Image (cartoon, rainbow, N blue to C red):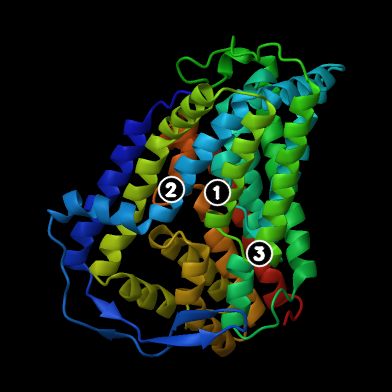
Amino acid sequence: MKLKKTPDALLIVAVILVLVIVSTWIIPAGAYERIEKDLGDRTVTVVAPGTYKEVDPQPQSLLTAFTAPLAGMVSASNIIAFVLIVGGAFAMLMRTGAIDAALQKVLERAQKRKGNSLMVIPILMLVFAFAGYSFGMSEETLVFVLITLPLARSLGFDNFVGVAIPFVGAGVGFAGAAFNPFTVGIAHGIAELPVFSGAAYRTMICAAFTAVAAFWVMHYARKLLRNPELRFLPEGEGSAKALDAVPFTLSRKIILGLFFLSLAMVMYGAVELGWYIGEISGLFLALGIIAVLIARCSTAESVKAFYSGAKDMLPAALIIGLSKSILVVAEDGMIIDTILHALSGGAGNLPKVVAVQMMFLVQGAINFFIPSGSGQAAITIPIMAPLADLLGIGRQTAVLAYQFGDGLFNLIIPTSGVTMGILSIAGIPFGKWLRWVWKLILVLIVLSMIFLALPVAVFQWN
């Protein structure tokens, strides 16, 4: 797979980095006090409400633009290593031909009757939405886009569809999650609510989000089938990008079975064993090694495949590191708490229905600087939860506003390493992605506002 258009993404992130550096000269430095909070199975550092105070300015030099990328890569080293290792391991898996053979079976069944290929979209998006809903799939979509891109092209679609299936699918599930331990679990613990409570309402929300997103992608895919010239296929990935004939042998079936077993282990490990990217990357590396052994690939071609896969992921890894450097600069300039203090204070004197929408938009704004769901929960929920009490909104609704602000805006913010990394892999410039997805995001935002208003204006949700 060839990665295109990465200079576009790098340029956008670099410009934002410079803007954040300049903002440290303008925005007053400030800080909240931090305290340790025991959540039972873990301890997190959270903001102490009411403790904000201005501190000595920490303006960052323009020279920081040249040193921050290294600091960002060090800070994001675990995710960068995850991307490179899994990219290499996945290339080893692809070298066996098991994935290509399985995709051909999917294509054969999809082409048996007219229009059946469209049904692949909602089925797969439902699977990814469930992954976001249950164990908070996020970074893992960097792996699955390597499957869905060739699948989408082979079905007559394009790279937008290939990205939307795992990325938007997991994103809407993440935004409406009921059992995501990294967002809902932490936020509930900090807000002193029963962990994973309110699951019924969140499940309804997740179903609505998924249905809207799947319909949107299917509508676009249907247009592509009628007008193939509208497809977005970066240079070298044109309509001739069909899968070569690969027999579905017994060894490939075994490898595919191990692949699906690995996916099940990822879900179980994330929910029950507290797995994160270290364990997941190790699992995929083991899968890649076992796969080439079963397929009897030579050592030379296995190593070459790993190198090639890691090399193809390098642009995405660079963008992830540069995106992380923006957060490093904002933290060093001590402007994040100031921004949070100003934004959260704006909701205090508003009617409840309006205030809860403000909380949602504030979370979206904060998410620009803190794309990490767990990190955002630790910083914002200690402030938003007592604010919700004062406004009579309810802490469950405050947590929901945080979920929406984190999950939905992650699909469009250039400071998210996952977002920019996936677009880099697919060769989609960030500007083109925004033009393609903005109407869907707008619909989801409107839906979010309705789902936030209902427990405030219609029924009590505790």
Mark 1 residue element = helix
Q: Which mark is residue 281?
A: 1
Q: Which mark is residue 295?
A: none
Q: Is residue 375 above or below residue 50?
A: above
Label 1 amino acid? Ser
Q: Is residue 156 above or below residue 368?
A: above
- C-alpha span from label 1 to label 3: 20 Å
The one nearer the camera, 236 or 103, is 103
Residue 370 in view: yes
Residue corresponding to mark 3: 180
Percent position (x, y) of residue 246? Answer: 71, 15
Residue corresponding to mark 2: 81
Instruction: Classify residue 461 as left or right of residue 437.
Output: right
Asked if disc 1 and disc 2 are in contact, CB closer than 8 Å, the reply is: yes
Label 3 amino acid? Asn
Instruction: Classify residue 360 as left or right of residue 457.
Output: left
The one nearer the camera, 225 or 36, is 36
Mark 2 residue element = helix
Q: Residues within 10 Å of mark 2 (few under 14, many from 20)?
A: some
Residue occupying the point 33% across, 70% down: 336
Q: Residues within 10 Å of mark 3 (few under 14, many from 20)?
A: many
Q: Earlier in the sequence, mark 1 or mark 3?
A: 3
Label 2 amino acid? Ala
Instruction: Classify residue 5 as left or right of residue 428.
Output: left
Q: Nearer the viewer, mark 3 or mark 2?
A: 2
Percent position (x, y) of residue 3? Answer: 43, 27
Percent position (x, y) of residue 339? Answer: 34, 71
